Amino acid sequence: MSQHGKVLNYVLLTPQEMAKADRLTIEGGVPGIELMERAGQAVARAAARMVPASGRIVILCGPGNNGGDGFIAARCLAAAGYGVDVRLLKAPDALKGDALEAFRRMGLSYALSVEGDHIASDLGALLDGADLIVDALFGAGLDRALGGVAEALVKAVNKCGAPVLAVDLPSGVQGADGVVCGETVSAQETVTFFRQKPGHLLYPGRQACGRVTVAQIGIDVTVLDQIAPDTFINGPDLWLDHWPQVAPTGHKYSKGHAVVFGGPVTATGAARLSAGAALRAGAGLVTLASPPDALLVNAGHLTAVMLKKVASENGIRDLLSDKRLNAVLIGPGYGVGEQTRSAVAEILDCNRASVFDADGLTSCAVDRAPFFESIRSHKAPVVLTPHEGEFARLFPELAGDKLTRAREAARMSGAVVILKGPDSVVAAPDGRMAINCNAPPWLAAAGSGDVLAGIVVGLLAQGVSGFEAAAMAVWLHGEAGREAGPGLIAEDLESALKPALRALVEKSDLR
């Protein structure tokens, strides 16, 4: 498979984009009911894996195409010998199009309407004795909170204790952004079609999905050329062609020289974590620029990382007059205030690939207009690495879901933005987005973000472009967290990067 084809496997589709993929496929000659047949059969296969033969399966079907998938699944499971009960949210006369045809094909006389004459006084009674519940109520297209009987039914599903298989997305989760409004089905597994949606990867929706599998239902990958999606799962095949290769004749000076600016004697550790990570990420040389009062403390901890005394903003300009120093990080442990804003301005004026993190972001939030203006006129890549608190200070007017906020922040600032969290998002000013999904929960540790910023600057020093460096760094950071395991502290991450880096280099060498 070509690299282009591998990138297409990382594509995420919004519900609107998925609807376009369906439409283009139907216009190309594949009947909609055939797509529904294949989707329903995939649901049936997933259900059969979750339930012993002859188990009882309750399938809850909404009035749209999600319900149609459930009708197909019901027919297939009944034919395989399972006990199947189908419950419609609406009366059958509310069905239309392919969903109506799927209902007719099902032919089950025991498909009863929850809202019709057969409504149970206790919705929980509908679910008693179920070995599995299939949630085919709403899927990815829902964009509002559930209410009425639908809300009550979802509550009953979550209360009954039976495992749940969700069709496309658990009902109550918005496919475009993972936002949850009100009551939401909590599924053990979810089966979706053609490509995942952002809602499968973004919290809190991600937590409701359980294990996600993707079924191919006959939609040709060429439809993606017409859809032109710009949101991806973050992973090696998305950016491996940009991985910095080391030539056989290469040397440390050909791998770039990163500079990390450290803070006062009372806060030296953060910058050292960053500097060590930059070196581990492959920068040929790394210098920690230290204020005079912290020089001896830093010298007592550093070996391969070099040390340089920098006393003022003038010292920054003097240091960066050496053009070999091609990537800069400032923020971790540097301090908050006017001095930091001045240092950031000096760095931007020197036109180096730059990473701004932590105190650098908080300091510039006070007067962000010149900060953003300098970034937009900057020729070299700039990456911002805020957590949610820093993001709110720097972009106070942005609200809504994580994707929308990160994308707009990148557009406003002109920088690549890493909005950190358990589902970190990387956003480029040109609209590209990557959602990360390999970070373990124990990566939430003091100093972890300093390591991430260091990986970014180490990759920038090697000439990697901004979006790719940010996406690589976030993924590597997650892999290091997985390697270090529960109980990690930030100091563990530098050495834990080695196995992930080795695997990437070996994979890259195979291309």
Image (cartoon, rainbow, N blue to C red):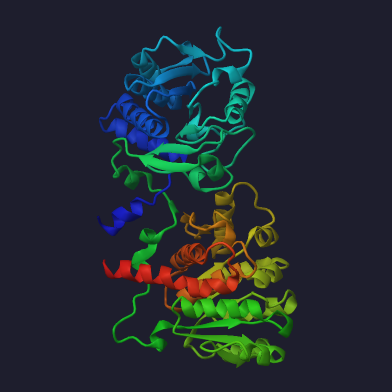
Up-down relation of residue 126 to residue 308 (above or below): above
* Relative horizontal placement of residue 239, taking residue 257 as reference (left or right): left
Q: Is residue 243 left or right of residue 443?
A: left
Residue 280 position, x and y percent, is: 47, 78
Q: Is residue 375 left or right of residue 229?
A: right
Q: Residue farthest to the top? A: 117
Q: On the rendered structure, is 390 left or right of 211?
A: right
Residue displayed at 25% across by 30% down: 29
Give the number of marks.
Answer: 0
Quadrant in the picture for residue 218: top left
Residue 380 visible somewhere in the drawing: no
**Residue nearest the viewer, comparing 272 with 240:** 272
User: Looking at the figure, which quarter contains the N terminus?
Assistant: bottom left
Percent across and percent down for residue 295 are 66, 91
- Residue 161 x, y percent position in the rendering: 57, 30
Depth order, front residue of 400/134: 134
Residue 66's image quarter?
top left
